[in-house]
Structures are given as C-alpha cells and as structure tokens.
Amino acid sequence: MDRVRSCSALDGKRVEHNASLRVSNDWDPGAHKVVCPDDQRLIGITSSDQRGLCTDATEGDLWQQGTTAVKVAQEKVTTDWASGFTRYQCAEGQFMIGYSQRGDGMSAILCAPGRIPLAGAGRTLWDDKYDQRPASGESGDYAEGHIKAQCNADEYAAGIAFSWKFWRGGHPDALSCRKLK
C-alpha cells in the first residue's frame, strides 16, 4: 500500500510555529521559530515573512531515532554554495527541520541527524528576487504573495544563506537543497 505523503505550511510571523514534539519549544530563546512536524523535513522558505514548507515525501521520517536536534548559529560550511552571503548549514548527515529569526534577521537553523546517509548533490535556490519552486506546483502556493525558494520533493534543505543589510534585516536569501539519494 502506498503511503500518503503530506506537506505542512508553517507561519512563524503570526505565531511561533513549533510542530515538533521532539524539539524544545525554546531552542533559540527570544527568537521566532518555525519547526517542522517530527516526521517531516524543511524544503521551502520565504524571503520576507518567516514561512516554511515541510514534507515527508519520498523517504518519510528522516530523523534517526534516539538523536537530538542541533542548533546552528555560526557559519561552518564545507562548500561555497552562496558566495558573499553568511551561510548556516547542517553538518553532513543532517537535514534542516526549522529556522529562527529575530525581527526580520536570521538567528539560527535547526538540524536533525538522518536515519539514512545524506550527502547528495546540491544546488542553491535564491528567494531574493523571484520564486524558485518545482514546476509541478505539487505543494501549492504555501505563502501567496511572498517570494519563495522550494526544494523538489526528492531533496532536503541543508542550509540557509542570508546577507545583513540595513534595509533587509538579514532574512533568508537562499536555500541549499540536496538530493536524498
């Protein structure tokens, strides 16, 4: 029997959205947080209004049982996937399940250890000028009127890039997507 896959749209601007039971509600004190449900991974972000898109497509729950989510609030990257921008990136073998912002500025990302090897080929999607989403439109417009970057259903988000500019506040500019297999 085929498993029904699902998507969850998260809105951190209106309410602090922590759909996870495995993650502490206050993993980044004082910041607005967007966290996927426990069986999903982050695959989409908006540039300006703290929304995210999560899915369980292709692999279902990726989170390795008995492990803890890891907050990343410093730039530690292995490749230059967004030159000139500050990049918060999950360690190899981890995938993004959430992110936090203070005002409109990036604060941290939240990563979870994968139950399968995660180190697929990567690409960078920019959400600073126009939507970059799958042509299929399979998850619908989860943030109508806002610019979005969205990985394909067979990918996972590995990091967010941003730039501190006084007129933009350091909100997400790019999403690092990697193939699941």
Image (tube, rainbow, N blue to C red):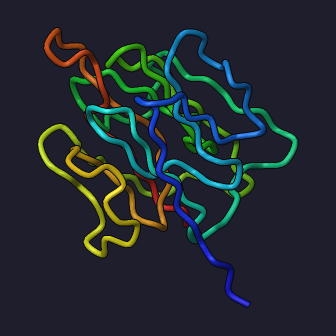
- Percent x, y for residue 151? 38, 57
Asked whether 71 or 122 is in front, the reply is: 71
Q: Is residue 169 left or right of residue 129?
A: right
Q: Is residue 31 left or right of residue 61?
A: left
Asked whether 61 or 103 is in front, the reply is: 103
Residue 19 sits in quarter: top right
Q: Is residue 111 left or right of residue 11?
A: right
* Furthest residue toward front: 14
- Percent x, y for residue 87? 37, 26
Of the 4 image quadrants, the one containing the C terminus is bottom right
Q: Is residue 169 left or right of residue 105?
A: left
Asked whether 17 or 80 is in front, the reply is: 17
The residue sitting at 53% across, 55% down in the picture is: 8
The residue sitting at 17% across, 9% down in the picture is: 166
As drawn, 37 above or below 111: below
The residue sitting at 18% across, 37% down in the picture is: 128
* Furthest residue toward right: 66
- Percent x, y for residue 130? 14, 48
- Percent x, y for residue 98? 54, 36
The residue sitting at 74% across, 54% down in the picture is: 115
Of the 4 image quadrants, the one containing the N terminus is bottom right
As drawn, 154 above or below 28: below
Residue 18 sits in quarter: top right
Residue 135 sits in quarter: bottom left
As drawn, 93 above or below 142: above
Q: How many marks?
A: 0
